[in-house]
Amino acid sequence: MSYEIKGLNEECGVFGVWGTSEASHLTYFGLHSLQHRGQEGAGIVTSDGKKLQQFRGRGLLAEVFSNKDDLENLRGDAAIGHVRYGTSGNNTLANVQPFLFHFHDGDVALAHNGNLTNAASLKRKLEDEGAIFQSTSDTEILIHLIRQKKDMDFVEALKKSLNQIHGGFAFVILRKDSLIAALDPNGFRPLSIGRLAGGEYVVASETCAFDMIGAQFVRDVQPGELITIDKNGMHIDHYTQETQLSICSMEYIYFARPDSIIHGVTVHNARKKMGRLLARQSPVEADMVIGVPNSSLSAASGFAEESGLPYEMGLIKSQYIARTFIQPTQELRERGVKMKLSAVRGVVEGKRVAIVDDSIVRGTTSKQLVHLLKEAGAKEVHMRIASPPLRFPCFYGIDISTRSELMAANYTVDKMRKIMDADSLSFLNIHNLIKAINLPDAKGAPNGGLCVAYFDGKYPTPLYDYEAGYLKSLKQQRTREVIGK
Amino acid sequence: MSYEIKGLNEECGVFGVWGTSEASHLTYFGLHSLQHRGQEGAGIVTSDGKKLQQFRGRGLLAEVFSNKDDLENLRGDAAIGHVRYGTSGNNTLANVQPFLFHFHDGDVALAHNGNLTNAASLKRKLEDEGAIFQSTSDTEILIHLIRQKKDMDFVEALKKSLNQIHGGFAFVILRKDSLIAALDPNGFRPLSIGRLAGGEYVVASETCAFDMIGAQFVRDVQPGELITIDKNGMHIDHYTQETQLSICSMEYIYFARPDSIIHGVTVHNARKKMGRLLARQSPVEADMVIGVPNSSLSAASGFAEESGLPYEMGLIKSQYIARTFIQPTQELRERGVKMKLSAVRGVVEGKRVAIVDDSIVRGTTSKQLVHLLKEAGAKEVHMRIASPPLRFPCFYGIDISTRSELMAANYTVDKMRKIMDADSLSFLNIHNLIKAINLPDAKGAPNGGLCVAYFDGKYPTPLYDYEAGYLKSLKQQRTREVIGK
Amino acid sequence: MSYEIKGLNEECGVFGVWGTSEASHLTYFGLHSLQHRGQEGAGIVTSDGKKLQQFRGRGLLAEVFSNKDDLENLRGDAAIGHVRYGTSGNNTLANVQPFLFHFHDGDVALAHNGNLTNAASLKRKLEDEGAIFQSTSDTEILIHLIRQKKDMDFVEALKKSLNQIHGGFAFVILRKDSLIAALDPNGFRPLSIGRLAGGEYVVASETCAFDMIGAQFVRDVQPGELITIDKNGMHIDHYTQETQLSICSMEYIYFARPDSIIHGVTVHNARKKMGRLLARQSPVEADMVIGVPNSSLSAASGFAEESGLPYEMGLIKSQYIARTFIQPTQELRERGVKMKLSAVRGVVEGKRVAIVDDSIVRGTTSKQLVHLLKEAGAKEVHMRIASPPLRFPCFYGIDISTRSELMAANYTVDKMRKIMDADSLSFLNIHNLIKAINLPDAKGAPNGGLCVAYFDGKYPTPLYDYEAGYLKSLKQQRTREVIGK
Amino acid sequence: MSYEIKGLNEECGVFGVWGTSEASHLTYFGLHSLQHRGQEGAGIVTSDGKKLQQFRGRGLLAEVFSNKDDLENLRGDAAIGHVRYGTSGNNTLANVQPFLFHFHDGDVALAHNGNLTNAASLKRKLEDEGAIFQSTSDTEILIHLIRQKKDMDFVEALKKSLNQIHGGFAFVILRKDSLIAALDPNGFRPLSIGRLAGGEYVVASETCAFDMIGAQFVRDVQPGELITIDKNGMHIDHYTQETQLSICSMEYIYFARPDSIIHGVTVHNARKKMGRLLARQSPVEADMVIGVPNSSLSAASGFAEESGLPYEMGLIKSQYIARTFIQPTQELRERGVKMKLSAVRGVVEGKRVAIVDDSIVRGTTSKQLVHLLKEAGAKEVHMRIASPPLRFPCFYGIDISTRSELMAANYTVDKMRKIMDADSLSFLNIHNLIKAINLPDAKGAPNGGLCVAYFDGKYPTPLYDYEAGYLKSLKQQRTREVIGK
């Protein structure tokens, strides 16, 4: 059985804070440090203890909140926020989170990072029962499930509803009297608790948000947990006991900020270790090591140190890439106009270069990098990838291209090397990846507590709607494409 | 004698291209790679062989040229462009270059990088003779000088006028039938000639612009040269023979892009060498070396390699700093909210850290860096600066703060160390700076062909209007402050 | 019994077209002619026979659709559009119509002009049954009612739902295969059918939209009708037979454009007749008649002709009033700075002036007008109002201030005259208002087929949620205020 | 001899105020009432007694000054302002007034309404002497003429310079210690002095600006006058005694606001009289009179009263025409989509209509009007024009199309009638025009003190650069086209 899926999943960042009059400002700065997790939209909802207020918009945080009043009008002592990555098709304001719902018995706001594997069937069922959806986001499903349970109190209904959804999810929920965080039973997505100097609790997708606002790390949210923060402090509960840690390894490889600490591991250190182990696993005869800015610099410096080769700046990334930049025409591209990356001729000319990248998706960038370096005079270009070949899609919250587009799903490593015209090409193996990350609190768990399904196709959960043919029969090809065999 | 000057000087980027129908697009991409030289304004003037057209605006290039039509309406086979750094006081559209002048005998456009040392007295004299200035820029003076010489042809008048102005300047000038580049007699500012695949000439402040557009480097413009590019190709002439190379050493230390090659020296390589020599000159007992992103990363890796210490990512710079970002309030700042730089706790905690920075101006950033690192758990913080102490202002085109604000002009190195709470502090000495850059084509020239006046106060030219008391007597305190003694 | 209500009701404009490839453009121009019915938001939904697409935004039509692509991207042969009047409290994008709902069994879009009198209780009931509302608009209630009826086909469910809602409503509904128009049982709001040269049907709140796009008037939609337009042409049906025409008289007095024809009566002609009957009812000794621009000019010219007095331009309204205009400070106001209306000194100086206005709400404008004219030298100012005193709120779709703010609800006519310092003041009586409008197709209906409840307090229907005390008990004071006695 | 000229001339509005801390705000509101004189740009310069500050931009006043700070940052007790009409070719920011020049001996700002007839030759001469122009505006010439006169004091140099320029001009000039107003020797353009309640002087193109800000009219500026306002009050001087009033009759016919009083005549009253005299001169058998909104409504009501016919609203002009409005395609236009004007079917259907318009330029609008009315069912359409046929261009400050485009310059009245398909067509004759305006203070002057050259081709002054062939020889066809014969 194999899968192909395209462009639906989301990688986002969530944030929450409780108990300080600067709630909206702290959320803004917290989201700023999570901006790398989503640049398509941003929003904040605050609670003043009576009602909830929302401000959201498309684009970068700084574009959405363009003047001070936007923040200052968001009054209250509690807030949640969201930065959104969205594929073009569903990039409408209606999909920008946090979602805010006004009910006669109290407002509720939700923000979500992840992807549900039974969203399509749940939505279909709810709609048949009269539910009306405003967004195309999975997130809205949860609130419908909760509101269906008319006779339960909110937390009871929430727990029951969390057991109805499957996949990867990290939710932060705001009500007038509490802030709630919940993580899926596999802990696919990172979510941490921190504390400000005054003792106020904060929640964030990554710990870099705590450093940004001067908060101290308290603990990671664990799989299956439901954490409530209110005037009585923090209360840790579970909505399920059937859990198994399976945190996304791509967070360590590519997504997370190098200064974040996830389940006890500093991302930069993990990446440097990936570089070191890669150097041992696939050494290279070269004059220098260079990294692809910015995500591969940690791995590259590890590779350089382990190899004893000099670490050089052989590629420059423009600091001024803007959304509105006018793109070069095809003709200009052929004339050699580059927008993002330039090779440094004075560094690589006449040299044998080992270039370290974090991963290969479609392979087009890799091909360009080799071309750039050779054009700038590099004698040899050896490509070293600090993660295993990406061969399978993710269904738990990160947007990996369809399988048909994944280079490693279609070619052998040697064929890939030839296509990209590199002098050699190696990938870090799964064993070394797990060893490099080396989660301290997950000894004994399969794959050291990591999800590596995009590398080996072994998904740690059933796939529900993504099982062969199901989504197709729902005729939802507009948004999701599944090809079974 | 001592000087104080504030905020007037400019550091900008210029670009020119001749002979291709994609002139405006190539200028746009060329300017994109020069964006680090000025973010306050940008403009392009094109020539279609009959008349000149202008588009310019305040802000980043991508903000100024916000849609394709802006570029496509700039028709013609030749263009010059400019990115501008401007101090707040004179940041009006009228000061955004290139300047375009329409005359009944032909349009002229000018773009300029540098600062004239006799601008004030020339302007006063011209105004007394009836001249009317529209901008507060030095650049406008040149065109008035040219137009005064009614009986000479343009190039003759230009040569004579270039002999009337003093200071640092790199001009590109566009007329309907030619593109002209001119450099001051000391070559204070960088300016290079390149060539596109089709043989068309380009001119740029830095060679990184050539890489961006697929052009090959041809030669650096030499001090005192006047280079004309027209349908007959490139013609090299001199407006003066009294020249002496004195290229700005701060271009190598801080301003230029690491991939640019200036007078034969790749900037990254020079910086790495500065780091290496600094490690030899001022070694440190530490567990790791970290650089201040992004300008000090080359020097830091050189320092690490020479020291045999691991090179780590101990500081993270946000990639999403926007002009419009809402700043933290004083209260939030005190709570620890940071906007630009974060220390990586998982890297530095419990460690002895050597931090390499390129230079110290006011010293406030250095102080914050030490504080950030110690707060994140660093046991010791050793500050290493890969250039000599900045003690004097520049009058040739870069904006260094008034002398009273330069930390090194007011304190000993030891006192600086105490102020910033570092465990040790060292600066690269001038001798090692010159050795690290090691200009190949300037053997025998004073200071190896470099200007190091901001370090030793020995200016390679007379200072004209900046001589003690003169500017003051002109009562131009609004824009320039000079205190003589 | 008395009522007070504030700021909730809406006065909007709707438009629909079926069967032409220029559907979005025709809707744009149709809405342009309905812009006077709502300036707070605008939107268009089109159908290409398979799916529906939406574009909407806050502000004027020209602000929302700011470039051609916005229209051209709305593909398809059918469209509905909406211009929205909204009070500040609920002026969010979520409330801008048409609303578009995506269901697995087909998209539905709705646009609405009117106000439901049982919205609050219906919404409460639906929410208790699990429904989730995204807007604060009455309009969303209809779609929830329809979706509840799972086993019925769409039109059957719609008919049943229309019988569950009460108040004033004109709906246009778009589905992939049909355009539907429905009017409330009293026909409180205007809604007309027209036909383009090619035979394609259009629907609009006012016939002026037909003139704008070159369409011919076909018929008014009658109370209780449900009209379906699809590939088979137009089909007229009823969802109820219990109807009684009671069209809003304020449409004739103030709201509608003078060139619109509603139920056979040209609005300008009705207004002119109001002016004529007012002149007969309350003649005045004066030197001239002036109207308050622009809505009172028809009535004023009728008054002038009947009186035999010259009709002069004694007041000028600025044509350049913009939403973004900087308002005069209190101090400047006291110095006499005026923004919107100026008196023409050269016309009124030394003269006895009869000024005709269409209606008086709070009375503040009337007071200013008298002051303006006297300041400009008018010897006497006689105020003539071409409608009866507004004493009661409207619950069927127009936003009249709370009763406590209505001048005529609180003062006698003579007291009003004194407050505004006029030399005389008269209102058209209800009898003459009905006579002036003189609906041809409503002989025998109460009040000649008109709703005059804001004048006499006799509402033609029960008021449901607006009955004394009910809304209050729902604790919805945030949006609706009802005070019973 | 005949002339053709295109697109160069300007019709603008100027304003000035002296001696109040609300100078910038009063100028803003004054300019607001002059907005009809120019919608392409607006600007204000203020003086705080030491230096002058400028804010200007393209577009409507409300677009240029989009937030309060723009006004509040313009500090000082004196200000001048300008609203600009500009033809597309020269609609750049550099041409937006007031112009501000900084000199070491004091700042000067200028704003101008009018057109110079010897601008081209003066500019050529000045440029040959070394002057550099930044704009393509005539206005800049004056400051160059002043600065040439190095040994004279400012007012002396200004007087001499005013004698060097020819044509129509109304200047307001601001210096740190005075506000100056100057009018050309024929008084072609209107310019008036007013006074605020506190005694502070204001200057404006039209008196409607005084009403807007609560100022009282004091006197019209007379031809050849130079009026200085400073701390000592108002001082009236002359720069020439060779004057002859020849105020532009088109100000009364079309340009000025109906509430303005120019040389003692209220514009509305003059227009109404034009309508009355036209009715006597060219009576019509019709059922009603309608005016073309908004400029012809005064004349139409005069025509109606004199004829004894009812005055009806047979045409509606949209109040929501925006600069950014998406225009109908050619196909939609053919389908009958109209943007600006609609005929009122319910008024004109089956009726004989007399339509009064103020003037005919190209005749295209007139043709459309007749078509609109007949399409709406009018039985007959009789066109009455409340001014004589426009046959010649203006060189003194209003932009009339080239002669080749003026309908009346190319066709007889009867041919015009046929082209526009009217049932009859008449123009007010020159005699009646002069009689209708009837300037009280110009008895004995030719044409009653009015310029009627666009009607009879008899220009009251020599035409200098516009004499046959001259401009052509200057090869300035880009901006001005003159064809001699």
Image (cartoon, coloured by chain):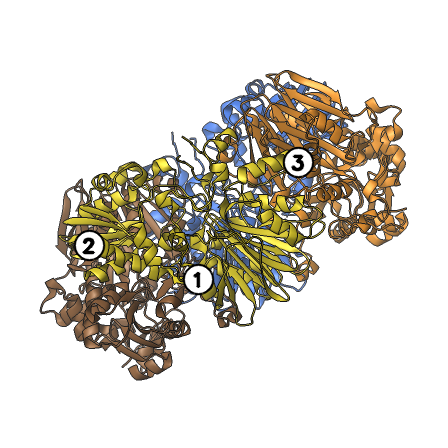
Chain colours: A orange, B blue, C yellow, D brown
- The residue positioned 64% from the left and 67% from the top of the image is C232
Q: Nearer the viewer, mark 2 or mark 3?
A: 2
Circles 2 and 3: CB atoms closer than 8 Å: no
Q: Which mark is residue C208?
A: 1
Observer-nearest of D364 and B434: D364
Q: Is residue C91 left or right of residue A417?
A: left
Q: Earlier in the sequence, mark 2 or mark 3?
A: 3
Q: Is B172 rendered above or below residue D360?
A: above
The amino acid beneath tag 3 is Gly
The amino acid beneath tag 1 is Cys
User: Residue B266, how many percent across, how many down?
Assistant: 67, 44
Q: Secondary structure at mark 3?
A: loop
| Extreme residue toward the left, this view | D444
Q: Secondary structure at mark 2?
A: loop
The amino acid beneath tag 2 is Pro
Q: Chain of mark 3?
A: C
Q: Earlier in the sequence, mark 1 or mark 2?
A: 1
